[in-house]
Image (cartoon, rainbow, N blue to C red):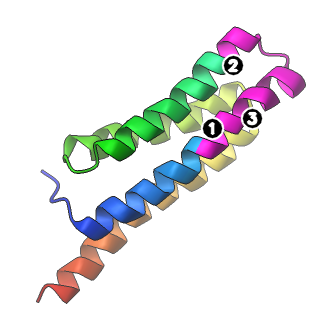
Amino acid sequence: MITVTPGMRRLCASVLGMEAIVVGLMTPVAINTQGIQPAVAATVGLGLALLCVVVIGLLKHPVAYIVGSVVQVLAIASGVMVPTMFFLGAIFAALWITAIFVARRVEGVTSR
């Protein structure tokens, strides 16, 4: 299982916080430029943003990092509604993976 460190929580919370803003702002883009029904766009965009915020609150628990990884997959999949999200979702997934590995490496070095 994942060992949760304070630095990893901070970095992952930062990634999810920025991601929540981006996926939330995807809602009006999906409605206005892609012609997605407002109810569908709001459910997907705002639901994913809310999920990001919930996961931020759960980052003390190792299972939150699994759910956070699922959020990254969902963000990429939201590219079906707004094609730019394929690219942005991939960037956030890369940031998520980097945050986990960099924090573990840095805190592993400083704990010696």
Observer-nearest of 97 and 53: 53
Q: Which residues are drawn in magenta?
A: 21-41
- SS assignment at label 3: loop
Q: Position of residue 5 (x, y in %)?
A: 21, 65
**Residue 26 drawn in magenta:** yes
- Residue 24 higher or lower than 100, as above or below: above
**Which amino acid does the dot numbered 1 rest on?**
Val
- Quadrant of the rendered structure where residue 105 is? bottom left
- Residue 7 higher or lower than 94, as above or below: below
**How many C-alpha atoms fall within 10 Å of the one at disc 1: few (<14), some, or many (≥20)?**
many
Instruction: Mark yes or no: residue 51 visible.
Output: yes
Q: Residue placed farthest to the front in the image?
A: 57
**Which amino acid does the dot numbered 2 rest on?**
Ala
- Residue 92 higher or lower than 109, as above or below: above
The answer for how far apart the CA atoms under marks 3 and 1 are is: 12 Å
Q: Is residue 52 left or right of residue 46?
A: left
Q: Residue at x 53, y 24 (%)?
A: 47
Q: Upstream in the sequence, badge 3 or badge 2?
A: 2
Tell me the residue that label 3 is attached to.
83
Tell me the residue that label 1 is attached to.
23
Q: Quadrant of the C terminus?
A: bottom left
Q: Residue at x 49, y 31 (%)?
A: 50
- Residue 23 higher or lower than 107, as above or below: above
Observer-nearest of 87 and 29: 29
- SS assignment at label 2: helix
Tell me the residue that label 2 is attached to.
41
- SS assignment at label 1: helix
The answer for how far apart the CA atoms under marks 1 and 2 are is: 10 Å
Q: Position of residue 73 (x, y in %)?
A: 48, 37
Q: Upstream in the sequence, badge 3 or badge 1?
A: 1
